[in-house]
Image: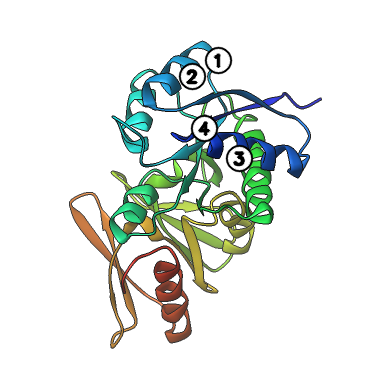
Amino acid sequence: MDKIIKYLIVEDEEKSRELLLKKIQLCNIPGIACTGMAANAKEAMLLSTMTPPDFILLDINLPGKSGFELIHELELEGITPEIIFTSAHTEKEILLGALKHSPVTYLVKPIDLDELEEAILKVCSRIRNTSNEPDFPGKIKFQGNLGPVFILPEHLIIIKAESHYSRLYVENGKDILINQSISEIEKEVLTLFPHLFIKPDRSTILNLSRLVSIHIKSNECILSKGNETISVKISANGLKLVMNAMDSFGHGS
């Protein structure tokens, strides 16, 4: 039997907290339980240290410390829940800041019930999948030549197909050749992290949070890798998909 997945609601307005809880209950998703509701980062920290949540529905603009600051403080305490951002704001700077935290999704208020249900189902799937690897929480498992390879999603920059294999371009490390086709990888990576990764063509998966620039004339995407950049060529149609994905999340092309 699957464990109960615990969640916390962090929202400064009482009516919004109550409405969000009612909407979650209307989704009627089994195996989840609310551990509490907080009006600010201080309350959220207290509730999280008492009962660490598996995921948080987090408003970004909170009185005092922001939702981003709360995530940082939780990390310092070793508490790393999955995040579903909830906000009425769609400004580019806020959306870019949210993407850096690899959220499950970003729900814009007023929150649509179907989108809320989809987000919670995704986060539950993500939690249950990662919980199967207790020694490597939050990491994606790949089949390397010398055994399993575990990589944090935010450290995975590009995946390129190489015949029946795939090559991973990762942060602070050499490229890794793995014994999986890109179609095999796609099923997990894009299902668990649909707002972080995109597959613009048959041979490439990109981390959108690493995108620095797009060169239309040369069909290239430039992505950051530490203090360096990586250039990857993709198809013209793929380039359009990347631009649309960035625009939908508030990025300019």
Query: Which sits in the foreground, 60 or 127?
Result: 60
Q: Residues within 10 Å of mark 2 (few under 14, many from 20)?
A: many
Q: Amino acid at mark 4?
A: Glu
Instruction: Identify the residue position indicated by label 1 in the image.
Output: 51
Where is 93 relative to 74, above or below? below
x and y percentages locating residue 146 in the rendered image: 51, 40
Instruction: Identify the residue position indicated by label 3 in the image.
Output: 20
Residue 6 quadrant: top right
Mark sitting on residue 48: 2
CB-based contact (under 8 Å), mark 1 and mark 2: yes
Q: Amino acid at mark 3?
A: Leu
Where is 25 relative to 253, above or below? above
Q: Secondary structure at mark 3?
A: helix
**Which residue lies at the image location 33% right of the left edge and 59% below the top edge?**
91
The alpha-carbon separation of the residues under discs 1 and 2 comes to 5 Å
Residue 172 quadrant: top left
Q: Amino acid at mark 2?
A: Ser
CB-based contact (under 8 Å), mark 3 and mark 2: no
User: Which label sits in the foreground, 4 or 1?
Assistant: 4
Query: Which sits in the foreground, 107 or 12?
Result: 12
Please, which residue is most extreme toward the bottom here? 217
Q: Is residue 110 left or right of residue 232?
A: right
Q: Residues within 10 Å of mark 4 (few under 14, many from 20)?
A: few
The alpha-carbon separation of the residues under discs 4 and 1 comes to 21 Å
User: Which label sits in the foreground, 3 or 1?
Assistant: 3
Instruction: Identify the residue position indicated by label 4 in the image.
Output: 14
Counting residues from the start of the chain, the first of labels 3 and 2 encountered is: 3
Counting residues from the start of the chain, the first of labels 4 and 3 encountered is: 4
